[in-house]
Image (spheres, rainbow, N blue to C red):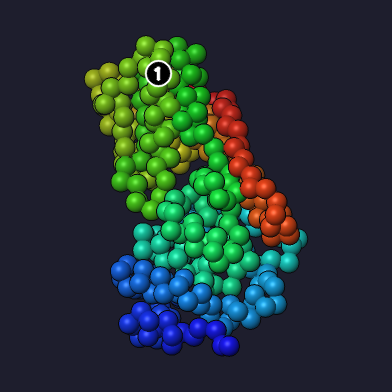
Amino acid sequence: MRGPTIYDVAERAGVSISTVSRVLNRPEQVSESTRARVLAVIDELNFVPRAEARARARKGTQRIGVLAPFFTVPSFVQRLRGVAAALADSPYELVIYNVDSVARRDGYLSSLPVAQRLDGLIVMALPFDEAVAQRLLKHGLETVLIEASRPEFCSIDIDNEEGGRLAAEYFIQKGHRRCAFVGDSRVPPYALHTSEWRLRGYRQALSEAGIPLPDAYVATAPHGLEEARELAHYLLDLPEPPTAVFAASDTQAMGVLKAARERGVRVPDDLAVIGFDDLDIAGYIGLTTIRQHLDESGRVAVELLLSRLADPSRAIQHIQLPLTLIERETA
């Protein structure tokens, strides 16, 4: 008996063949309701596109996909570098899918298990719901998560709140009592709110030490170097400016440092600055920061994925990489 065809899917879903094709190949171009209806029929019929069926028949496509938001942001670049280095001596080709909207995220996560010729998928810092999880599992697309966790998939994560606590505890140890925060506002709805979690840990540790964090000392803006520079100028203009600033990323910490330099504020004598990530550049500029192992997270994700591809019966693993405060010249 022949398997279901794209014609069967189109007829059952009440759409054209071209619409089914777009759902599979350009899902962001299809409305959410239509995409959901077509995908439901695909799941019901167990439809597999012919190219994918041939790939499965030969047991592998030799392609690993990475789904990532903000893939030009330095921290994601370093994670991708870890992935690429780990795949360098393998037979697998690396394919990167950039997510810049909810529609693109949902479209990729819905269609990739069905339409794309991938052996495995790494999802970076993108939450998804139970329906997506079940589709990934149903179609057998081995998936590893970075900076997120679900019980059904291997994952690599960090404790963002602990990172905020580390920054606060360091400032407290150094005798600071006017401690501020520079972070993200308007985080895209398809992304994780890591800045908020880092602020939560920072605020809690300060509170436990009896140090308030006034609303005026919490400055947020869309992520970026220039935006952070402007936030720092706002903080330094306060009647009682802070003596310490924890930035939710190294990029934002560099914006704070630029503002301090423009104002003639001495770092760390007048203003201590801590970042988050430990990007390559952090060591060159002497930035005190919370180190998360970015390259290592990419490398470990590949190791977990390849081990599961080699032996699908291997136990699901959830790895939490440690955070470390790296003391340099800025704090």
Disc 1 is placed on an element classified as helix
* Disc 1: CA contacts within 10 A as few (<14), some (14-19) or many (>=20): many
Q: Is residue 283 visible?
A: no
Closer to the camera in the image, 15 or 120: 15
Q: Amino acid at mark 1?
A: Leu
* Position in image of residue 84 (x %, y %): 65, 57
Name the residue beneath numbered marker 1: 206
Left or right of 7: which side holds 317? right
* Residue 46, position as x, y percentages in the image: 51, 74
- Residue 271 location, x and y as percent? 41, 22
* Residue shown at the point (52%, 52%) measured from the top left: 124
- Compared across the picture, whether 135 is left or right of 27 comes to right
- Quadrant including the N terminus: bottom right
| Whether residue 319 is situated above or below residue 12 in the rendered picture | above
Q: Nearer the viewer, residue 39 or 60?
A: 39
Q: Is residue 225 above or below residue 56?
A: above
The image position of residue 129, as x and y in percent, is 42, 53
The number of callouts visible is 1
Residue 263 appears in the picture as rendered: yes
Could you tell me which residue is drawn at 32 percent across and 17 percent down?
Answer: 212
Name the residue at the left extreme.
Answer: 239
| 66 to the left or right of 315 | left
- Left or right: residue 299 compared with residue 208: right
- Residue 93 location, quadrant: bottom right
